[in-house]
Image: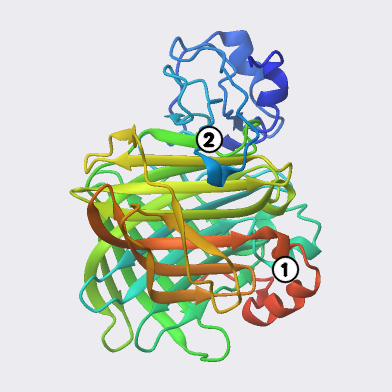
Amino acid sequence: MQISNLGTFQKFWSQFSSRFGKKKSYDTKRFQQSFSSNGRLPLRAEPGWNDGNFSTPQMRNVDSQPISSGRRSASWSGSSDGDAIRIARGRGDENEPNFNLDVPPNGYAWWYIDGVEPSSGQAISIIAFIGSVFSPWYKWSGRKQPQNNVCLNVATYGKKSRFTMTDRGRSALSQESHKLTIGPSSLLWDPLKKQLIIQVNEVSSLPLISRLKGTITLKPSGITNVELPLTKEGTHIWRPFAPTAEIEVNLNKPEWQWKGHGYFDANFGTRALEQDFDYWTWGRFPVGKGTSCFYDLELRNKEKYQFEYHFESNGKAKSIDCAPNNSKFSSSLWGIKRQTRCDNQSQPRQEKSLLDAPFYSRATVSTSIKGKKTIGVFEALDLRRFRNPLLMFMLAVRVPRRKLWKNKP
């Protein structure tokens, strides 16, 4: 099915903009009209000009059978081969991350990093949010100002694990193309070394309150240039920057200096997750010298989609032909159903529970992908549960609010 109204598709992402200085030469009149009143250049999922690289995106309907009875692929992105994955666009991050984005009301942007030390099983995850999607304070505010609900969520897993997720106000946010500062912590992209450096200086939440401070360095083996729309309308985008990477962790806790395999991606949206999704699972699994990633989605309109891609160590992406089906394994401690891709002759298994919440589960999981055994990071997100207003009061205990922040030299 062809999109007959490209403007409808574009409007969701026209609100994203970036303040980087390098500009291409396009039609001057259209280029000038693309600036918003505050002088920022609106960036679109579908470019507002024809740069010769993309045609009008094509869609095709998928069958209505339950997903368990057979894989259903989605094709709606405008890629040359009809695949859902496509060249990254609209945010100035096709070659490297760009943190200098304007997130519209009701929207969000997050940058996610994780790492695992294979021998000990220690792990870490870092998520930098503008418009903190799981913050009760952002929800209670009406999601009007995403820049007023920002945070750096850091979770360590293993001995003396900690969890930090302080919701901060607008004064804590500073954005540059290569640097994102949230209160006392920051993410810095080094364009010469092509490394991501995360400086952490946070206080962990209940029940173990202490300062978590140090440096995490992510060294990608390659940077991809692709993204995946998670909805036909383009309201949610997954941008896998570095599916294969090395990570070095150096924190101010005993035994929290280690190296392992890492991962770096981002998600962007112009609507709340719970507006469009009921449930999803995601996983990233080291396979060979690269990484296989899986995204399985259940939308509120009852549509279901499966995506499976392998990323070579240099960042090159390709679809996984005849990818394994989903196989169920044990539910989380809160009873969230979990399933991930696994060969028919094998069974996925949780190796370590990393994070358990009433609506969310993260774990390291062992599985077999096309005959290769692997242990990777898996998450399951139940947004039907997240829509329960009572849950917000539980989250407020784990996500304290600090509205004001005075930057210190």
Quadrant in which residue 301 is drawn: top right
Q: CA distance from mark 1 to mark 2?
A: 34 Å
Percent coordinates x, y for residue 91 in the rendering: 51, 35
**With 193 as the anchor, is 28 left or right in this view?**
right
Q: Name the secondary structure under disc 1.
A: helix
Task: Say if 12 sits above or below 156 in the image.
Answer: above
Of the pair 355 and 331, the residue shown nearer to us: 331
**With 219 as the anchor, is 224 left or right in this view?**
right
Percent coordinates x, y for residue 328 in the rendering: 48, 61
Query: To which residue does mark 1 refer?
Result: 136
Identify which residue is drawn at 71% across, 16% down: 5
Q: Name the secondary structure under disc 2.
A: loop
Quadrant in which residue 323 is drawn: top left
**With 392 as the anchor, is 23 left or right in this view?**
left
Of the pair 291 and 36, the residue shown nearer to us: 291
Residue 356 in view in this figure: yes
Of the pair 60 and 195, the residue shown nearer to us: 60
Q: For the residue carrying disc 2, how many other residues have a C-alpha within 10 Å: few (<14), some (14-19), or many (20+)?
A: some
Of the pair 144 and 318, the residue shown nearer to us: 318
Q: Amino acid at mark 1?
A: Pro
Percent coordinates x, y for residue 84 in the rendering: 49, 29
Query: To which residue does mark 2 refer?
Result: 72
Identify which residue is drawn at 45% across, 18% down: 24
Residue 196 in view in this figure: no
Q: Amino acid at mark 2?
A: Arg
